[in-house]
Image: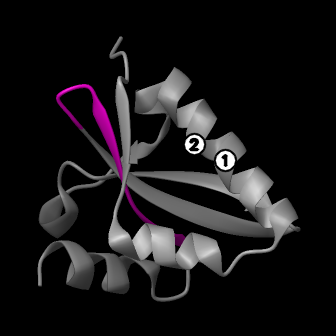
Amino acid sequence: MIEINKVIQSPLFAKQKKRLHKNQIKDLDKAVREITQDPEIGTMKIGDLSGVRVYKFKSMQSLILLAYEIIENSLILYTFGSHQNFYRELKKYINP
C-alpha cells in the first residue's frame, strides 16, 4: 500500500474549492482524507486519462467526481465536479 506524504492541489482545484459552501468543503475534505488513507480507492482511467483515478462521493444529495493522481508518494488533486462534461474538461486540463 502506498503512503501519501504530500497533497498537492492544482490551481483549478483550489479555484473550484473557494466557490463551495462550508458543508460542501467538509464533504470534499472527507473524500480527500479517504483517498489519502487508501489511494487506490478510486477507479483507474484508461486512454487519454491513463494514470488518473476518479473517486465518487456524495455531497448535498448529488454525486461528485474527484480526479487525482499518485506520483511518488504525492497525491495530486486535479479537479472535481458533477458528471456533466467532467471527463471532457479533465482531458482539456491534463492534455491541453
Q: Which residues are magenta?
A: 71-81
Name the residue beneath numbered marker 1: 29
Q: Nearer the viewer, residue 18 or 57?
A: 18
Is 48 on the left-hand or right-hand side of 42? Answer: left
Q: Amino acid at mark 1?
A: Asp
Q: Please give the name of the residue rendered at 76% of the width and 53% of the height, measured from the top-left corner.
A: 27
Labelled disc at residue 32: 2
Dots 1 and 2: beta carbons under 8 Å?
Answer: yes
Magenta run includes residue 72: yes
Could you tell me which residue is drawn at 36 percent across and 11 percent down? 1
Q: What predominant SS class does the magenta segment belong to?
A: strand
**Residue 33 in the image: above or below residue 96:** above
Where is residue 58, by image quadrant? bottom right
What is the three-letter code of the residue carrying label 2?
Answer: Val
Q: Give how far apart the Cα atoms at labels 1 and 2 are.
A: 5 Å
**Residue at figure coordinates x 61%, y 34% from the top left:** 33
Residue 32 horizontal/vertical position (percent): 57, 42
Q: Nearer the viewer, residue 52 or 30?
A: 30
Decide: is 79 above or below 42. below
Name the one closer to the observer, 33 or 54. 33
Mark 1: which secondary structure? helix
Label 2 crowd (10 A; few <14 / some 14-19 / many >=20):
some
Can you give x and y, in whole percent of width and height, for residue 52 in the image?
A: 28, 52
